[in-house]
Image (cartoon, rainbow, N blue to C red):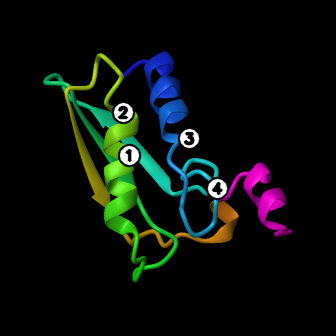
Amino acid sequence: MDEALKENIMGALEQVVDPELGIDIVNLGLVYDLELDEEGTCKVTMTLTSMGCPLAGTIVDQVKTALDGIPEIKNVDVNIVWNPPWSKERMSRYAKIALGIQ
């Protein structure tokens, strides 16, 4: 996948907001990897802020919806992983400021 397409995908994923924290999944550092195969399946490897996240299904649905308008993507596979575990160090400076974290 070329850098422009990857930036386009990450930009679309910035529209997916964690409902509990009010910050998008990219700035929270929840997106770990993106892959796009020859058939147009985009695999999004990501995590959640906690294992018991009650809104996991909602976030997965929002990821699929956010990527729906990108012509190169025909299908979206969201892979939720727990390793490496998420921590606040993965957050962007923007997210830390917005949440008052130093």
Q: Where does residue 39 sit, x and y in percent of width and height?
A: 13, 24
Three-letter code for the amino acid on which mark 3 is drawn: Glu
Three-letter code for the amino acid on which mark 1 is drawn: Val
What residue lies at 79% left-to-right and 52% top-to-bottom?
Answer: 93
* SS at badge 4: loop
Viewport quadrant of the N terminus: top left
Asked if disc 2 and disc 3 are in contact, CB closer than 8 Å, the reply is: no
> Is 66 displayed left or right of 29 in the figure?
left
Q: Mark 4 points at which residue?
A: 23
* Residue 96 lies in the magenta stretch: yes
* Category of crowding for the residue at label 1, using alpha-carbon neighbours closer than 10 angstroms: few (below 14), some (14–19), many (at least 20): many
Per the model, the C-alpha gap separating discs 3 and 4 is 9 Å
Q: Name the residue under label 1.
A: 63
What residue lies at 42% left-to-right and 77% top-to-bottom?
Answer: 53
* Residue 21 lies in the magenta stretch: no
Q: Where does residue 58 sit, x and y in percent of width and height?
A: 36, 60
* Category of crowding for the residue at label 3, using alpha-carbon neighbours closer than 10 angstroms: few (below 14), some (14–19), many (at least 20): some
Mark found first going from the N terminus, 2 or 3: 3
Three-letter code for the amino acid on which mark 4 is drawn: Ile
Per the model, the C-alpha gap separating discs 1 and 3 is 9 Å
What residue lies at 84% left-to-right and 68% top-to-bottom?
Answer: 100
Q: In this view, does 100 lie above or below 16?
A: below
Residue 14, numbered label: 3
Q: In this view, does 44 lie above or below 10?
A: below
Q: Where does residue 43 sit, x and y in percent of width and height?
A: 28, 42
> Is 83 displayed left or right of 49 in the figure?
left
Find the magenta span and give its range.
Answer: 91-102
